[in-house]
Amino acid sequence: MNLANIDLTMVDWARAQFALTAIYHWLFVPLTLGLAVVMGIMETIYYRTGSEFWKQTTKFWQRLFGINFAMGVATGIILEFEFGTNWSNYSYLVGDVFGAPLAIEGIVAFFMESTFVAVMFFGWKKVSRGFHLASTWLTGLGATISAWWILVANAWMQHPVGQQFNPDTMRNEMTSFLDVALSPVAVDKFVHTVLSAWVLGAVFVVGVSCWYLLKGRQLEFATKSLRVGAIFGLIATAMLMLSGDHSAYTIGQTQPMKLAAMEGLYKGGPDQGLTIISAINPFQQPDYETQDEPALKIAVPYALSFLATRDFHGYVPGVRDILDGYTKDDGTVEPSLEEKISRGQCAIADLQTYRKAKREGADAATLSALAAEIQENMPYFGYGYIKDRSEVVPYIPVCFYAFRIMVGGGCLFVLLFVLAIFFLYKKDIAQVRWFHWAALLCIPVAYIVSESGWLVAEFGRQPWTIQDMLPTWVGVSQLSSSAVMTTFFLFLVLFTTMLAVEISIMCKQIKKGPEL
Amino acid sequence: MTYLFLQHYWCFVVALLAALLVFLMFVQGANSLIFSLGRTEDERRLIVNSTGRKWEFTFTTLVTFGGAFFASYPLFYSTSFGGAYWLWMIILFSFVLQAVSYEFQSKLGNLLGTTTFRRLLVLNGVLGPLLLGGAVATFFTGSNFIVERDNIVDGVATPIISRWANNLHGLDALLNPWNVVFGLAVVELARTLGILYLMNNVADENLRSRASVRLVGTSLAFVVLFLAFLGKVLLGEGYAYDPETGVIFMEPYKYLHNLLAMWPLAVMLLIGVVFVLYGIVRTILSKTYTHGIWPTGFGTIVTVLVLLLLTAWNNTVYYPSTADLQSSLTLQNSSSSEFTLRTMFWVSLLVPFVLAYIVYAWRAIDKKPLTIDELNSDHAY
């Protein structure tokens, strides 16, 4: 097997293109998911009260939803097809497992979303109030179900379950749909991601409402929207923190290298503290081979052990432990990287032997025995393509800082929503100008925080397209780097232009305000 | 349910989605005529808003088609999308431009102007059907790829399983004139459907009478191009395989043989063509008939469904390779596992329910044809 002819520059461009599309996609999707609930709540109030005020308020937020929605849809289709265009080996090797959630997403979720979004926008005068309300909620439900299935697919890449490699077809095949659809990583990912989207939507509503207060316009609209946004946001943030805690625990169990990178934990052990901050050079991979911990580390004692193992004295492996091998608290021995590489190479060699035997017409018993040998080392198959220790360590600075931005942002939003509710009920919020500015500034912060979450999730998984199974350089298509670079820049120009147009339209619509 | 049944069942589902997609490309067809059918700003707004209430269906069907193909025939997905890179990328680009053009075009703060976005809709209206049609035509004419599964452990050059055998990466499909003929046929079909849809959906006499005149030339061009391609396909060689050995070979009149061997498909093809023509001819002949989109749309779905099934059922190679015949893809050598196809079978039982609520919502929105008064008094693009 020859890896020398893989164009690594092309692999990097393919990764960059997927990252670009995913980052842009995630600029639009969370607002769609978050505003969907806010609109639903507001229209429900309209349905119950018949108040024209709530109807116009709902319609205003729906207009912003619509401007944002189209870009989410547009970038989403690129993501789906990029699995094929740029990651063809990946598509074949895991399509049997990965394709199913995507197909179900289309059949079950996308049609619900696209059908009822049309009724939501164009049906105000054409359908009954009840049907319209149902359409608004179903649009949000469709978007949320869509998130479920795509996150099931993503979670499977982080923690492949419910599948087995078939040497006859040379691919991974699904053996348990429920294991794939309800994997603990998928559940955590869905809950955490959707809640984070709700928080972003709530921050957006609070921020925009505060702009009106700052301008002294549409005070009733702004105050009531702010109330809905802040209460919804506070509930969502509280749930988000709980789900974040559980996600961290799951990562500790399933992707220890990601956790070690998030924490800048080079040398682990029991009684590990949770790092609040330390000095890691953002532009350089730290020397995890010789250092035990980053400089100027400030940590909460025992907290990381508790987060990762639910035991204050639990063992948490660092980067070096994972490379050298370690023993878990339950006595299980995790092999060293060298052993994993060796077993991965064995899996590849066994597979070659099996294929050769099959070509030469070996009998069923021989093939069955060879197939059993392959399965023995198959969990380490991807390591057979690893040449160097450094290849399996994700870029620590991005994981480390993105994680802190994500958690810090979450804490900031709790404060934002608590203050908003305090000022709404205990003070005249229209007069607290500093808070208006703070809320407004929180809108871009919310986007940065939201994207940071994905940086943690995806950078932390590197170099794997599928954890332990397929490194990125084996998952690609046979393309030239210039071709992928060209499409990268085309997408960059296209998405950036459209983003600029969207922001401009959004600002104008907000300036125009609701028709009250 | 046997594995073989499931492989054929999923081929049917994917083909049905493709057929629905072709019908729903009335959106693209109508958009390609924004500037020629719509002479005034009001007329152009009516066209854009009429298709603008349906574009999501076309888009979603395209996405679901891709997802279903990926799930049921991952080797096709990896081979075609990874190989015919430029062809698929241009298609994707054009659909992305369409998605944003509706919402952005007439909004305050639109930095690029209304006309820019309408031109993008026209671009998608032509390029989308042309390239999708060209891509579908390769199911009959073949593509330039090689598949070698052992590459993943044994690759002499790289571990990549599927590779394109030339550097044009899909643009080579447009060098085959028959692919272009079929692509143009799909463009004209989309325009025909678009005209019929506008006549049904928009209450504007000027637009309707202009559309009626335009329908003659457009539908004639479609019929000529389509018959030329159909004739070539039925009378030419096709790609077949032996189900026992998996060996692929060329067979004279393969697609004609398929029609004869699967006579219900021949009947369906006939019914489809009759419905297509009925909707067009009655609309041309009658000054008051505006429902032509329904018989022609139904006929389109049936005809395209049959054409696609001809490329795959009855031991036919649905994605032939012109670079290495034995690399060609069949339902049996490229499908997902039995377990996955079976699992998705149960999910696919939701499709009638999905179709039911689409029909219900569509009817609720389209109770009355669109007027300029409605655009001025309600949410509009």
Image (cartoon, coloured by chain):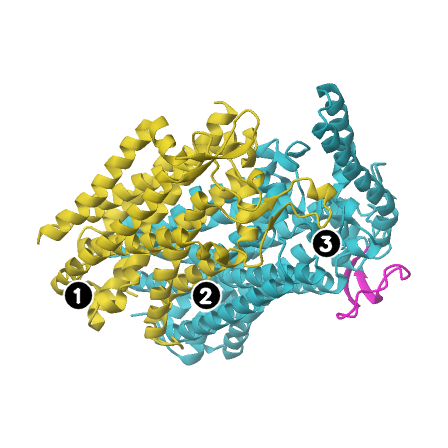
Mark number for residue A463?
3
Q: Nearer the viewer, residue A146 or A170?
A: A170
Of all chains, the one bearing label 1 is: B
Q: Which residue is mark 1?
A: B373
Which one of the lettered chains is coloured cyan?
A
Q: Amino acid at mark 3?
A: Pro
Distance CA(mark 3)–CA(mark 2): 38 Å
Q: Amino acid at mark 1?
A: Asp
Q: Amino acid at mark 2?
A: Val
The location of residue B313, given as percent across then percent down, is 43, 32
Distance CA(mark 1)–CA(mark 2): 32 Å
Q: Residue at x 49, y 58 (%)?
A: B171
Q: Secondary structure at mark 1?
A: helix
Magenta-highlighted residues: A273-299
Of all chains, the one bearing label 3 is: A
Q: Which residue is mark 2?
A: A205
The location of residue B210, given as percent across then percent down, is 15, 63
Distance CA(mark 1)–CA(mark 3): 57 Å
Q: Nearer the viewer, residue B294 or B173?
A: B173
Left or right: where does residue A321 sit relative to residue B274? right
Q: Is residue B309 above or below residue B227?
A: above
Mark with earlier residue (3, 2): 2
The location of residue B303, given as percent across then percent down, is 30, 40
Choose mark 3 or mark 2, whichever is in front: 3
Quick one: label 3, few (<14), some, or many (20+) residues within 10 Å? many
Q: Residue furthest left?
A: B287
Q: Is residue B327 above or below residue A272?
A: above
Residue B186 visible from this viewpoint: yes
Q: Is residue A333 above or below residue B84?
A: above
Of all chains, the one bearing label 2 is: A
Quick one: label 2, few (<14), some, or many (20+) residues within 10 Å? many
Q: Quadrant of the C terminus of chain B?
A: bottom left
